[in-house]
Image: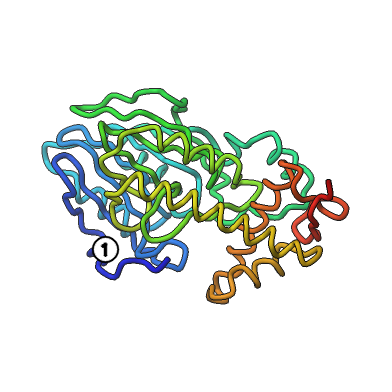
Amino acid sequence: MLPPDDFDPAIGVAEELEPGLRRLVAPNPSPMTYRGTNTYLLGTGGLAVIDPGPADDSHLAAILASVGPDQKITHIIVTHTHLDHSPLARPLADACGAPIHAFGGATAGRSEVMQELAQSGLIGGGEGIDSNFAPDILLKDGEVLHGDGWQLEALHTPGHIGNHLSLGWGDACFTADHVMGWASSLVSPPDGDLTDFMASCAKLAQGDWRIFYPGHGAAVTDTAGRLAWLVAHRNSRETAILQALDAGPATARSIAEHVYAETPAALLGAATRNVLAHLVDLTGKTTVEPRGPLHAEAEFQRVVR
């Protein structure tokens, strides 16, 4: 899915999205981050900073410059521990004195299956993880965080990574990297878990959301439609992967080269990790199986019933 051409915000400038909410885009554009990481400033007096972003002095300065004379940062909230979202949290906390809230550290929220895969050391992964991240205050699923004229409900939405949070703000939701309008989410085991990703889509679909504010790209106004697209997209990928395996055993890489034939070469590695996530999920469903130990380079085959 091609990104919309009309999302090209000024970098480092706090743009008002609606009363009490502003967005700053960090200077870290890439094929995986689009224009850059969205940092949100919530509130009018006591502010919450959602996803401070990457370790970048200019972005730290832009956040601090966006705090008015009658305002102060009271909460720092990190949705997940990827290097484009969490590293600036500690320097920001040191600068303003606010505590850092998050679901947990880099491996928090992993399913038992993914924990076993990680311990095996055979599955690879670990791309872009902020392994040193440590929050000051843990946010549990369903916990409500109260601020100065605002409140946020923490919604544990693992899938992109085990510690991923979405944040409900009335009928709006900060969906970070779980739901974005410009691209689907990378799911790379053992940090990413496709089984959890699909369950988190179902969880978000239970809400009556007016708008999604993602970690990258423009706001999503067709919230139900976008969630339905994500589910359908993953289901279509699963079908294509199974069709590829009907021709015989194959690796995640060879399947990705076939299924993601139109994907730029620079993104084929990410596509391979997405395919691997599907293969792990399908292994759990006993639909496919690895020929030998489950590892990143394993050949997989259909299960004959």
Q: Is residue 229 left or right of residue 106?
A: left
Q: Residue at x 28, y 46 (%)?
A: 40
Q: Extreme left residue here?
A: 70
Residue 52 x %, y %: 36, 47
| Colour logic | rainbow
Q: Which residue lies at the image location 36% right of the left edge and 40% below the top edge?
A: 94
Position in image of residue 61 (x %, y %): 27, 54
217, 126: nearer the viewer: 217
Q: Is residue 272 left or right of residue 87?
A: right
Give the residue pinned by disc 1: 11
Q: Can you give x and y, in whole percent of width and height, for residue 249 in the image? A: 81, 63
In the image, residue 147 sits, relative to residue 182, either above or below, namely above
Number of other residues with Cα within 10 Å of mark 1, as a class: few under 14, some 14 to 19, many 20 or more: some
Q: How many marks?
A: 1
Can you tell which quarter of the image residue 71 is in?
A: top left
Q: Is residue 103 left or right of residue 212?
A: right
Q: Position of residue 22 (x, y in %)?
A: 21, 47
Three-letter code for the amino acid on which mark 1 is drawn:
Ile
Kindly indicate the quadrant of the structure image that contains residue 46: top left
Residue that protrudes farthest toward the front in the picture: 305
Q: Camera-side residue: 237 or 52?
A: 237
Quadrant occupied by the N terminus: bottom left
The residue drawn where x is 21% and y is 58% is 13
The residue nearer to you, when weighing 25 against 87, is 25
Relative to 66, residue 156 above or below: above
Quick one: SS at disc 1? loop
Q: Is residue 112 above or below residue 132?
A: above
